[in-house]
Image (cartoon, rainbow, N blue to C red):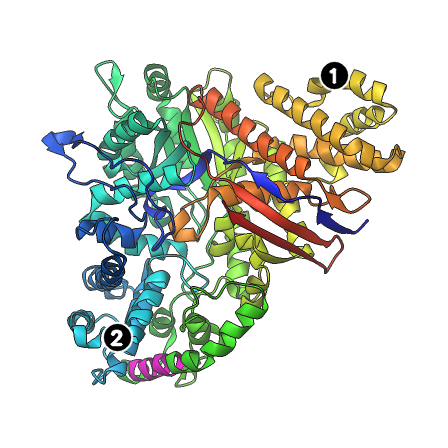
């Protein structure tokens, strides 16, 4: 039956792992998450070089960038509501001033070569446009300054220090731009948000780290491998160890490269610096919580995968010794970002970058005057459209409690409207544009094939890199982050590779390429937020990319085996004794046991609903066996909750829904028990993988978040729709 509904509301227990994490991107701008444990740390923590911590996260403190600044300013969570709201407003102004200071000190547009895309330029341009609007609102613009002029940002900082201009409209503008400058969005590449965050991490490194650790715990994450720069390893190792001891967590560090932004020479220099952290001091590791290397993605070029493998294999004895001597890990994790892409390019960038590269015979002063006037007109248009957009949001069943009068300003600036100067129509990076999507698909797919060639590389007639990295006594475990494109090919060719899936972040970065317009992005809100509608064509494309369940997933011997299971219940139970023999070679026994339990559990649950009919039963068993074969795609991660608007608990619910879409009974019901079984499989696989690579996971000593799925209904056919409603408990 094509129409289906959820048979009853479903509770999802917490998923305690985050296998794809960037430490700098975890904290959101604002959050409803608060620290629920006692003040931490209770006492100063000794740090390297004779220092000690000077921060404390108070019970009840909001865990966000705004909460961090409120804490820094001495605002206690127990302060009166009015005082806290006033402090929140002040923190927003302070956060915006930090963005101004970042642009003064590190303005990308001060680069000599403006022909190529400049890291941070979209975030810097957003700051510039906010300044242009603010100065025009108060009549202080004068001659429109260029984007690289620091006096502009100093003037706005000075303006906003005056209480006279801090009215409700100004605060709304500052808050709106904070949400756009410090996080990724449709018009800002994720790495631009990381560029902005550099200043708050530099100013308040300990407080930033403490708030981030507390945020992870409050999200229900007990086990994580989070990536950070090698220059932060020593301090973070100390803080991680102290936090783990205090809260029963198992947080681990990966040292990440600056891979995506360097040429080969500085890349190799970066690896050499990382290598020093794996050298022992005496007979012990310097930073025990460091368990591996995170190779950042080359989203706009082909990556240095072969050079990376040459480096780790050239240091094989070092890494073997490290894994043997480190009590905090059993393997050295090689986490490789591949197959994501961002779509930025020399001609797919900021408005100003596009102008500076392509304008001919246009005075810059004319351009900036037009740009500032255009920004203010778009601002005015957005304010006029606000009530209509709020009504539309309400009609779509979405909450308007936190509706901003400026919602849609970036759409007005960069998509719904346009600016043409002297015949040159300007354009801004947009994850839904055809240009971005074609670039994402090209570089993501190119890098997947580049990775494959690197794995196949060999010296003379010797073993390949893949064979050396995955041989039985190898100290490494290889995990691929993203791999949204061509995953089925890579998974089949290299059965020892694992994948961490982070769909929530792939939506906001444009890596999935699922939404070809801002309207499609908005329409499929249910996929991103698990509240709203999802087009079935989008859903099917997503399932096929990361967890293909077609009959083609099985080889002929597996099809014959599954067919034999349909003969009778007795044949099924007898056949299940040989289940492990039909799993891919090399499947660990602990994993095989969990897959056996899941397959039998799901078959027993769904079999009665097939009413003993052979063909529906065969279809069911084939799909469930395909799910079993895809087990290496069920390690989940958030990939920077704050920057990329993601949540690992949402990832677990989303993946459970993907695997159960199409398992509806002939009466049109998706079973609560089936969703729960799938979710339990993800947790069990996470534990087995952690046990094999890091150490035996105990029961999490934290309260895990729960999610309630109250509605899941739709019509399973092309060009149809699914409706999801869920909430946190």
Which residue in the protein does label 1 denote? 578
Residue 167 tag number? 2
Tell me how far mark 2 sits from mark 1, CA to CA.
Answer: 72 Å
Quick check: is 368 in the magenta stretch? yes
Which quarter of the figure has residue 589? Answer: top right
Residue pushed farthest front? 80
Which quarter of the figure has residue 660? Answer: top right
Relative placement, left or right, of 279 versus 306 is: left
Tell me the residue at 58%/64% (across/down): 397
Judging depth in this view, the residue of 461 and 41 nearest the camera is: 41
Q: Position of residue 390 (x, y in %)?
A: 49, 72
Residue count near mark 2 (Cα–Cα under 10 Å), binned few <14, some 14–19, many ≥20 = few
Relative placement, left or right, of 481 versus 371 is: right
Work out whether residue 115 can be spotted: no
Judging depth in this view, the residue of 159 and 333 nearest the camera is: 159
Q: Start and end of the magenta stretch?
A: 367-378
Mark sitting earlier along the chain (2/1): 2
């Amino acid at each position: 039956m094509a129409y289906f509904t959820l048979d009853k509301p479903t509770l999802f227990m917490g998923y305690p792992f985050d296998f794809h994490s960037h430490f700098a991107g975890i904290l959101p701008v604002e959050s409803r998450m608060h620290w629920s444990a006692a003040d931490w740390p209770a006492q100063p923590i000794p740090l390297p070089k004779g220092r000690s911590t000077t921060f404390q996260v108070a019970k009840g403190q909001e865990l966000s960038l705004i909460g961090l600044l409120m804490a820094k300013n001495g605002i206690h969570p127990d302060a009166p509501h009015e005082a806290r709201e006033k402090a929140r407003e002040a923190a927003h102004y302070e956060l915006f001033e930090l963005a101004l200071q970042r642009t003064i000190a590190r303005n990308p547009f001060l680069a000599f070569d403006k022909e190529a895309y400049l890291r941070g330029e979209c975030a810097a341009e957003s700051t510039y446009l906010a300044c242009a609007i603010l100065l025009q609102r108060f009549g202080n613009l004068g001659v429109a300054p260029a984007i690289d002029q620091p006096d502009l940002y100093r003037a706005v900082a000075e303006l906003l220090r005056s209480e006279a201009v801090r009215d409700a409209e100004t605060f709304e503008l500052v808050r709106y731009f904070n949400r756009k400058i410090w996080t990724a969005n449709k018009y800002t590449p994720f790495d631009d948000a990381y560029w902005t965050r550099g200043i708050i991490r530099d100013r308040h490194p300990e407080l930033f780290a403490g708030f981030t650790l507390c945020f992870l715990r409050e999200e229900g994450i007990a086990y994580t491998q989070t990536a950070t720069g090698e220059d932060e390893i020593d301090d973070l190792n100390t803080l991680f160890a102290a936090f783990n001891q205090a809260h029963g967590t198992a947080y681990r560090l990966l040292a990440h490269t600056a891979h995506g932004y360097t040429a080969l020479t500085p890349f190799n220099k970066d690896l050499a610096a990382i290598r020093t952290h794996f050298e022992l001091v005496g007979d012990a590791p310097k930073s025990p919580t460091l368990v591996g290397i995170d190779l950042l993605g080359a989203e706009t070029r082909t990556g240095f995968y072969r050079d990376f493998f040459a480096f780790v294999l050239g240091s094989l004895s070092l890494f073997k010794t490290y894994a043997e001597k480190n009590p905090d890990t059993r393997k050295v994790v090689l986490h490789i970002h591949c197959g994501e892409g961002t779509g930025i390019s020399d001609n797919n960038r900021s408005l100003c970058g596009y102008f500076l590269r392509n304008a001919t015979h246009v005075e810059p002063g004319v351009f900036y005057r037009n740009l500032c006037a255009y920004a203010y007109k778009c601002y005015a248009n957005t304010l006029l459209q606000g009530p209509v957009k709020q009504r539309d949001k309400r009609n779509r069943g979405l909450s308007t409690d936190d509706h901003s009068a400026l919602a849609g300003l970036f759409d007005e600036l960069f998509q719904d409207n346009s600016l043409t100067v002297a015949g040159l129509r300007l354009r801004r990076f947009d994850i839904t544009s055809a240009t971005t999507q074609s670039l994402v698909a090209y570089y993501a797919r190119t890098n997947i094939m580049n990775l494959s060639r690197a794995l196949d590389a060999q010296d003379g007639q010797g073993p390949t890199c893949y064979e050396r990295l995955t041989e039985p006594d190898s100290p490494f475990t290889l995990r691929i982050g993203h791999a949204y494109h061509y995953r089925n090919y890579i998974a089949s060719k290299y059965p020892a590779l694992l994948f961490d899936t982070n769909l929530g972040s792939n939506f906001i970065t444009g890596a999935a390429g699922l939404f070809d317009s801002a309207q499609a992005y908005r329409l499929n809100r249910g996929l991103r937020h698990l509240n709203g509608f999802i087009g079935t064509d989008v859903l099917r494309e997503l399932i096929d990319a990361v967890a293909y369940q077609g009959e083609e997933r099985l080889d002929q011997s597996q099809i014959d085996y599954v067919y034999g299971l349909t003969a009778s219940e007795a044949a099924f139970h007898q056949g299940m004794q040989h289940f492990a023999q039909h799993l891919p070679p090399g499947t660990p026994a602990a994993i095989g046991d969990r897959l056996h339990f899941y397959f039998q559990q799901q078959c027993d649950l769904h079999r009665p609903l097939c009413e003993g009919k052979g063909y529906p039963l065969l279809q069911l068993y084939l799909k469930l066996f395909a799910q079993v074969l895809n087990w290496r795609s069920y390690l989940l991660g958030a990939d920077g909750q704050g920057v990329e608007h993601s949540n690992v608990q949402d990832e677990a619910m989303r993946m459970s829904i993907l695997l159960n879409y199409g398992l509806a009974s002939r009466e049109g019901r998706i079973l609560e028990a089936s969703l729960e079984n799938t979710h339990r499989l993800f947790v069990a696989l996470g534990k087995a993988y952690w046990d094999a690579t890091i150490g035996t996971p105990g029961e999490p000593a934290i309260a895990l978040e729960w999610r309630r799925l109250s509605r899941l209904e739709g019509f399973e056919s092309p060009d149809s729709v699914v409706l999801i409603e869920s909430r946190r408990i």
